[in-house]
Image: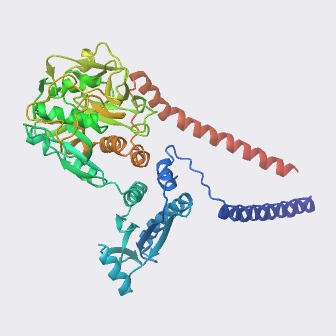
Amino acid sequence: MEVSRRKRRVRGGTESIGVVILIAVGLLLLNGIAMRVFTRLDLTQDKIYTLSSSSRTVLGRLDDIINVHVYYREMPPPQFMRIRQQVGDLLEEYLAYAKGMLRVEWIDPIGNPELEQRARSLGLQPVQMQAIERDQARIAVGYMAIVVMYEDRREIVPLGMSTANLEYQLTSAILKVSTTESLTVGIVAPSNPDQASGLNFLHHSLEQQYRVLDVSLEGEEASIPEEVSTLVLVGSPMLSDRGKWEIDQFLMRGKRAMFLADAVEVPQASLTAYPSPPSYDDLLRHYGVSVHSDLVLDVSSARAPFSSGAFQVMVEYPFWVRVIQNGFDRENPVVNELGSLVLPWTSSIKALPSETTEVVTLASSTEQAWVQEGYFNLAPTQPFQAMAGNQRVVPLAVAVTGKLKSYFEGQDPPLGVVVGQEGQQERLDASTTDTQIVVVGCSRWATDFFVNMFPNNLTFLLNSVDWLTLGPDLIAVRSRGGLDRPLGPVDEGTRTLLKLFSIAVMPGAVILFGVVWSLIRRRARRLVEVF
């Protein structure tokens, strides 16, 4: 019996060694194949560790060599080594898809006066890298930036302690240096100075990619500079007839516009509101979109801060509609990767019949939304559920694509407009090519306060401007930052079942597994003792 057991142990040990050797050989062969074949398995839902189709498209269109210089310490402190590795991995993918049109060089200027002088001439400055070694803090100095260069153009991408947005920054830089055309976005701000002052995020974010101009469309001197490619109208600026003419002819020339239209006035620090159609409402109706003077409420909503005595409380506020994944058009690149969007005090939108344009709903409410008209009580303490009636899906943001007819067709131009003379632009009664406009039923979602609370709002805004100005090239890259995945509305019965499942079923399943595993092991030991 003892000899038999010893033989089984020897045989088992030999088999184990054989299995280990086979696994080691298999891993070596797999590693050799992997070094010759470029592939990656990314199991994340949004493929966040795989180069996006937009980046691959930009790289595939390169027809000349782009130089990428990475200024980074060769041996940084341990916590900075991870960033260096992630940057290197990303650049390896860029090289694979660029097909020889990208050259990457790593440069460590520290200790080399000539390289340090070159880095400073590019506008780079050394940064301090704090390291903790043997319970002591140590400061290392190094450079952390990527310089993308083509001919006499260059773009600098600073590196920090996160690479979450690096693909967008790098693809954007490559697109900038490889494109000779200068792209300009014009912003028409609200007439209300308080609202206009809250657009710092909007300006700063657009300036990362475009030249940004403030455009005034009030009075008889209203004009849109010729270099503007896309116009963004925020809120309800007071447009003159000349201003409407400028917008109309701007669109007739095949250029694009985004209207953040407030059809209800919500005074600051007030709990009441009143209808106030935007001054360009007649233009939008002519182009096939109607923004109603109502307010949408939805069970899917965001929490809003309100003052209660000396304290501030956060309450679910149906007037702040939260658009969730099912509310986005999954065929449109502006929103197909977006996780959520919060639209405060937003109005409903209706598409009007047109033979030459197509209207697509980009964002809509859930099926449990309803609309309030007339008198608007904005108090957060009212019984919202009791007020809900005629619940339905409500369109909140739309895109219009196609050929537009001029609003001024068959009419005389506004006073002061001269057409047909030398040096003046030709009057157009229809758009020369297909054009696009995006219309959203409110504007406050794009202000600093809401962008700071809900970062996906900024992603939606920038996606829309990119789509109108550049096409879909950068949208899929930026949208990867929109990882907010809020749950849809859940009724009380479902919530109770989920709680019971978490409290009782899951722990019970773990205990049952432990008991079964223990019985299996006990039976196995008995079999060994018998034989």
Residue 520 spot, x, y in % from top left:
73, 43
Colouring method of the image? rainbow
The quadrant holding residue 279 is top left
Count the marks: how many?
0
Camera sees residue 429: yes
Camera sees residue 235: no
- In the image, 468 versus 501, the foreground residue is 468
Decide if residue 200 is on the left or right side of residue 174. Answer: left
- In the image, 81 versus 189, the foreground residue is 189
- In the image, 322 versus 20, the foreground residue is 322
Residue 450 spot, x, y in % from top left:
23, 41
Decide if residue 196 is on the left or right side of residue 529. Answer: left
- In the image, 246 versus 213, the foreground residue is 246
What residue sits 43% from the left and 37% below the top? Answer: 336
Residue 18 spot, x, y in % from top left:
82, 63
User: Does residue 261 sit above or below 113 in this rendering?
Assistant: above
Residue 386 spot, x, y in % from top left:
25, 15
The quadrant holding residue 165 is bottom left
List the single residue furthest toward the front. 422
> Is the N terminus in the top left, top right, bottom left or bottom right quadrant?
bottom right
